[in-house]
Image (cartoon, rainbow, N blue to C red):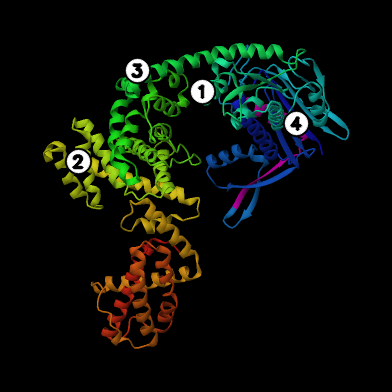
């Protein structure tokens, strides 16, 4: 069984594309081989800056012959049907067979495909792969039609077995496959022949090429750590940078240099960002001081002076970059100390946030109003939250953030500290963007939490107000991330917020901005309606009063505002389902809790859902659910049939059996215990009391016929079933649970 070795040798492939290209090469070739009838034992793909490599072991020497029979049209079918069948099979009419069938004679096609040699199949698959390779970006060069990420220079394609190696006859435009490749561009540029993958790997290493990207990463990291440790320093971990650098070199040579004294006073994050973004350097930290004092660069070759010339050149370029950063830093500090952060942020009035949502300065005003309103809900001082909100976006106007946008927020903290802000305000400037993703840290300081919630709620209510919601997979304004951020901020800090209140307030802020009203006063009036969940008519009335407008003037706007607030609450619920899915909580269990009052209190909602999930997964919970559904179904059918509601009057004196009397007693005990448990939000305790109903409910349905001949007994038993429904009702809407 032969093994395949394929190398596609080109000019430098961008590091960010290499891992995906490896996976695509492996999939395209192996899928193509299998479709053509060639199975294999294993396959592996590798990449360096100049080559994509695939090895496939244990290929079949040839594909197996294939015999296929296809049933065609009847013998008396229209000619068009027959011609279509012939086209699909590639046969002529005289090659078809007539066979007897239940409905007469039918044409059959017998298609026989002989087995083909592996080399022939490999050549076809490799050519198709090269011509249709899914590069994110590709180019043409010279006079050919071939497109590749960078000019493709050679193809190595071998099949080797016990008898030796055979070059597969692959031809793509001007390139014909051979058995040779090149080593390192500078250290071993001559071509050499190979006969197998092992021979290829060994000779590449001799030619100063490490084929495996993971091996290059490990070598870089180990050498960098050793050099730093020898000087009492440590490398700042950066997995993304490590992967990128490993994709830039074929023969990694780690060199460590020092940062000039003039730059050591810059914030560590500024040094790290500048070196990473511009130079692809790792930062070296002094663990005693926390300062960034050195850097590690990875060269692509060994030199006679052991990298001294390379380091000197890097130091020269780095000094120029850091001089710019130092200028930005000092210039920003001067502005902060003379004009304050509000002075720095004055230019935000000329920066458009969105053409329908005003400027960044408008947004800051809304965030300030929201943060002041939210602050008491999260245990923060309103004045501090408002102070932090006023300056949280100011660093967007700084020279440093203009050069390094990824430092926004972080530079805000440094500038706020320099301006004399304290009591959690500087930290809020940094943390109000968080959490940025499902694994990002959640702010815990009350001021940071208030401003972070205000920032995200302003974003959500704004885009909801202008009907720019996520659709399908499209979410250009990251609104799903913002909603998840609100959820994580609330749950991560265990705060009790009815999100309809700040949401309504946020909608009011946007509406007040558009109408030219004072934001805080008008938005607070709008927010009042959140206390009336489920009554949009009342909400519209409050909105009209808040904006002092006639029904004709603002009726459409008022209706839209009301709808957007409830729609946004539904969006939070959808995001919550995604968030809780990772905990194994099914959507129907969450729906059963969403159907309860207070569903805009996310902490309450999640506590209820977690307790219900644990309860339903228990044996008692599963059986009680079945008993509840049986009782509810019987009761619903009877109420529909009789046109009345059986919700009052169950009396133990009409009980005829011990099972009925036991159920009365169990319900009396459960109701007296569930009510205090629910009052303290002890959902687990309430459900434990519900679990005690399992046995009496089971016994009731085993021995009692609800629809008795006596109308009095029947009515009493139906009212008793209503008590089962009513006992479960405070916990969750069990009718929403599937199964």
Residue 701, how many percent across, how many down?
Answer: 41, 79
Q: Which residues are magenta?
A: 105-133
**Looking at the image, which is closer to me, 317 or 91?**
317
Q: Give the CA distance from mark 1 to mark 4.
A: 57 Å
Distance of label 4 from label 3 (alpha carbons): 77 Å
609 magenta-colored: no
Horizontal and vertical percent position of residue 156: 75, 24
Q: Nearer the viewer, residue 579 or 295?
A: 295
Which of the numbered marks, if any, corresponds to residue 338? 3
Q: Is residue 681 visible?
A: yes
Depth-wise, is mark 4 or mark 2 nearer the camera?
Answer: 2
Neighbour tally class for label 4: few under 14, some 14-19, many 20 plus, Cα within 10 Å: few
In the displayed structure image, the side of residue 457 where residue 436 appears, left or right: right
**Between discs 1 and 4, the one toward the N terminus:** 4
Please say if the residues under marks 4 and 2 sit with CB atoms less than 8 Å apart. Answer: no
| Residue 272, above or below 372 | above
Q: Is residue 103 left or right of residue 246?
A: left
Say which residue label 1 marks. Answer: 270
Residue 589 lies, with reference to residue 276, above or below; the image says below
Image quarter hosting the C terminus: bottom left
Q: Is residue 355 visible?
A: no
- Closer mark to the observer between disc 1 and disc 3: 3
The answer to whether mark 4 and mark 3 are in CB contact below 8 A is no
For label 4, the residue is 120
Q: Secondary structure at mark 3?
A: helix
Q: Quadrant of residue 384?
A: top left
**Image height of 71 relative to 241, above or below:** below
C-alpha separation, residue under disc 2 versus residue under disc 1: 47 Å
Residue indicated by mark 2: 558
């Amino acid at each position: 069984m032969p093994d395949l070795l394929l190398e596609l040798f080109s000019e430098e492939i961008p590091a960010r594309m290499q891992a995906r290209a490896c996976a695509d090469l492996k999939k395209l070739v192996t899928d193509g081989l299998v479709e053509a009838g060639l199975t294999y034992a294993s396959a592996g793909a590798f990449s360096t800056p100049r080559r994509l490599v695939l090895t496939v072991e244990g290929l079949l020497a040839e594909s197996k012959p294939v015999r296929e029979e296809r049933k065609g049209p009847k013998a008396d079918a229209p000619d068009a049907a027959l011609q279509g069948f012939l086209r699909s099979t590639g046969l002529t009419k005289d090659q078809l067979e007539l066979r007897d069938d239940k409905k007469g004679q039918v044409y059959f096609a017998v298609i026989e495909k002989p087995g083909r040699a592996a080399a022939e199949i490999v050549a076809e698959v490799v050519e198709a792969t090269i011509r249709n390779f899914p590069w994110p970006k590709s180019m043409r060069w010279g006079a050919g039609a071939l497109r590749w990420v960078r000019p493709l220079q050679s193809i190595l394609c071998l099949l080797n077995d016990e008898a030796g190696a055979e070059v597969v006859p692959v031809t793509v435009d001007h390139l014909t496959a051979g058995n040779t490749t090149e080593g390192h561009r500078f250290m071993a540029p001559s071509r050499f022949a190979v006969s197998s993958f092992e021979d290829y790997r060994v000779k590449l290493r001799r030619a100063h090429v490490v084929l495996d990207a993971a091996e290059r990463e490990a070598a870089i990291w180990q050498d960098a750590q050793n050099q730093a440790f020898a000087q009492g320093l440590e490398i700042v971990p950066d997995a993304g940078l490590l992967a990128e650098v490993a994709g830039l070199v074929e023969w990694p040579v780690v060199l460590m240099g020092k940062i000039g004294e003039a730059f050591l006073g810059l914030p560590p994050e500024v040094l790290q960002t500048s070196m990473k973004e511009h130079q692809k350097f790792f930062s070296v930290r002094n663990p005693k001081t926390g300062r960034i004092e050195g850097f590690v660069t990875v060269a692509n070759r060994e030199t006679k002076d052991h990298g001294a010339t390379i380091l000197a050149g890097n130091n020269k370029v780095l000094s120029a970059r850091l001089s710019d950063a130092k200028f930005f830093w000092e210039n920003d500090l001067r502005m902060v100390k003379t004009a304050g952060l509000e002075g720095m942020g004055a230019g935000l009035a000329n920066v458009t946030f969105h053409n329908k949502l005003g400027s960044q300065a408008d947004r800051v005003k809304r965030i300030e109003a929201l943060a002041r309103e939210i602050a008491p809900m999260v245990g923060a001082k309103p004045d501090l939250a408002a102070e932090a909100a006023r300056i949280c976006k100011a660093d967007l106007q700084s020279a440093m953030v203009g050069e390094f946008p990824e430092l926004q927020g972080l530079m805000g903290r440094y500038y706020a500290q320099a301006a004399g802000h304290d009591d959690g305000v500087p930290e809020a400037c940094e943390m109000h963007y968080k959490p940025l993703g499902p694994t990002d840290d959640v702010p815990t300081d009350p001021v940071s939490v208030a401003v972070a919630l205000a920032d995200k709620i302003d974003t959500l209510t704004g885009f909801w107000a202008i009907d720019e919601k996520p659709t399908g997979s499209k979410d250009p304004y990251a609104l799903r991330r913002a909603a998840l951020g609100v959820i994580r901020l609330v749950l991560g800090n265990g705060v009790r917020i009815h999100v309809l209140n700040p949401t309504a307030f946020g909608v009011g802020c946007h509406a007040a901005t558009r109408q030219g009203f004072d934001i805080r006063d008008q938005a607070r009036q709008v927010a009042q309606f959140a206390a009336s969940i489920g009554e949009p008519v009342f909400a519209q009335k409050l909105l009209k009063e808040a904006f002092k407008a006639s029904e004709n003037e603002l009726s459409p706007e008022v209706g839209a505002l009301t709808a957007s607030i409830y729609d946004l609450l539904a969006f939070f619920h959808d995001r919550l389902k995604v968030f809780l899915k990772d905990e194994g909580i099914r959507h129907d269990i969450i729906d059963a809790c969403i159907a309860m009052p207070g569903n805009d209190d996310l902490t309450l909602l999640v506590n209820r859902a977690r307790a219900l999930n644990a309860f339903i997964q228990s044996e008692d919970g599963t059986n009680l659910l079945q008993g509840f559904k049986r009782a509810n179904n019987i009761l619903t059918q009877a109420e529909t049939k009789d046109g009345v509601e059986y919700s009052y009057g169950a009396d133990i004196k009409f009980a005829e059996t011990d099972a009925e009397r036991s159920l009365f007693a169990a319900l009396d005990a459960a109701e007296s215990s569930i009510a205090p448990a629910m009052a303290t939000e002890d959902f687990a305790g309430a459900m434990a009391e519900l679990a005690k109903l399992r046995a009496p409910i089971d016994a009731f349905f085993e021995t009692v016929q609800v629809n008795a001949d006596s109308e009095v007994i029947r009515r009493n038993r139906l009212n008793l079933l209503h008590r089962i429904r009513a006992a479960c009702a405070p916990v969750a809407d069990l009718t929403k649970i599937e199964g």
